[in-house]
Image (cartoon, rainbow, N blue to C red):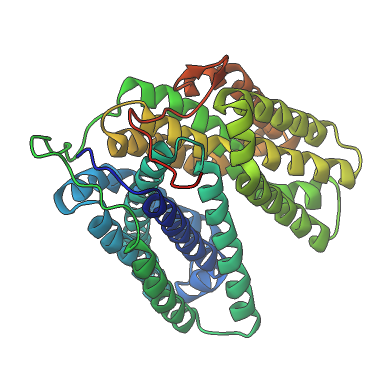
Amino acid sequence: MKDVGYEHREVKRARYAVAAVFTVHGAVTGSFATRVPWIQDHASLGAGQLGFALAFGAFGASCAMPLAGRISHRFGSRTALRGLIALWTLSLTLPSLAPNLYTLCLAIFAYGASSGMADVAMNALGVEVERLLGKSIMSGLHGMWSAGALTGSAAGTLAAHLGADARLHFTLAAATLTAFGVLAAGWVLDVQPADDEEPPPRFALPPRPALLIGAVGFCAVFAEGASLDWSAVFLRNRMDTSAAVAAATTTGFMLTMAIARISGDAVVNRFGAVRTVRAGGVLAALGGLLIVLAGYPVVAMTGFALMGLGIAVVVPLCFAAAGHAGPNPSQAIAGVATITYTSGLIAPSLIGGVAQATSLVVSFCVVTALACGLAVFAGVLRTAERGGRTEVSRPAAAVPDPRP
């Protein structure tokens, strides 16, 4: 990577631009999630067939994410992100066009592949902006992703309520989000490789530090996937609540995650990544205990809210730590992302399998144990020790702030 001196206002502008790209990326995910029932009916699929098809999203992302670094090296970060975010937003239309299981699997594979490549590219740029600013911003960026997902899901809920055809909904959403995404990507940093820098391999095992960091991310994403997909079922079946209360539990979990991510940078900058993740692990474990021991719906709802609060900043900090861990941020981030995507893929089915064999309570005992792992293994996120606390690594020459 070329050593380029950026002006402070240019870096601040790039921060807002990357945040906008994160929002667009999340809005695509939220839009898709709300119309899965329509896609299932359109392709005439059973529940098992739908689950099989949806797994191709994570499979596609895992296969394609290592390519993002090579694309950025070839075209530069700005041009690469423009192309990849456009590819991601436009791929939203593909699942709605699939008439059967086989075409849906292919469509969701392409959808997941474009998602993964754009994900790696925007996180790598977020890490670069964070490095130049010398303070944590990754939690806030992922908070903007959550805000985008909530916005996309709200628009999708309205479209579903109006009975809109998902093909029309996705086409309009894709056109709008593509325009915003490409416009925002035009203001990110244009990081170019050094003249003597070798292009990253198309496919390579992630470096060892990324594997350790990814293990922490695995625990957090497992808890996130389990809570998102099974919190409403837990309240409905275990606590015998109404459908509205069950749905409100999932919404509360998502809201606590979004709020914690948006406000998380201030906590990280004050206490450091390691302490923040350790405290988050304790909160998540406490939430898991409340879920497991709950005798009343409000206790379980509180537990899921604490779970969301505790795990919210872990994945952003894992990406940040991976990006700072070596000379090739894209490769390290791709490695961590692959591990976390895999966790998100297996969590819902594993929770269901354990629940089938035992009970949902036992399933969430597993989630609680993994949440404890966050507190125990948070130390792998340490990037630099300064003044007795963990901080984001700063560049050799920090960006000058023109303000007095």
Extreme residue in the left direction: 196
**Residue 312: x and y, percent?**
61, 41
| Residue 319 shows up from this direction | yes
Extreme residue in the right direction: 296
| Residue 93 shows up from this direction | no
**Residue 400: x and y, percent?**
39, 41
Q: Is residue 216 left or right of residue 249?
A: left
Looking at the image, which residue is at 46% across and 61% down?
20
Extreme residue in the top direction: 388
Looking at the image, which residue is at 34% across and 54% down?
118
Q: Is residue 328 left or right of residue 356?
A: left
Residue 111 sits in quarter: bottom left
Q: Quadrant of the N terminus?
A: top left
How many discs appear? Answer: 0
> From the viewer's perspective, is residue 30 above or below residue 10?
below
The one nearer the camera, 366 or 305, is 305
> From the viewer's perspective, is residue 296 above or below residue 115?
above
The one nearer the camera, 344 or 213, is 213
Looking at the image, which residue is at 38% across and 34% down?
398
**Residue 216: x and y, percent?**
51, 27
**Residue 157: x and y, percent?**
63, 73
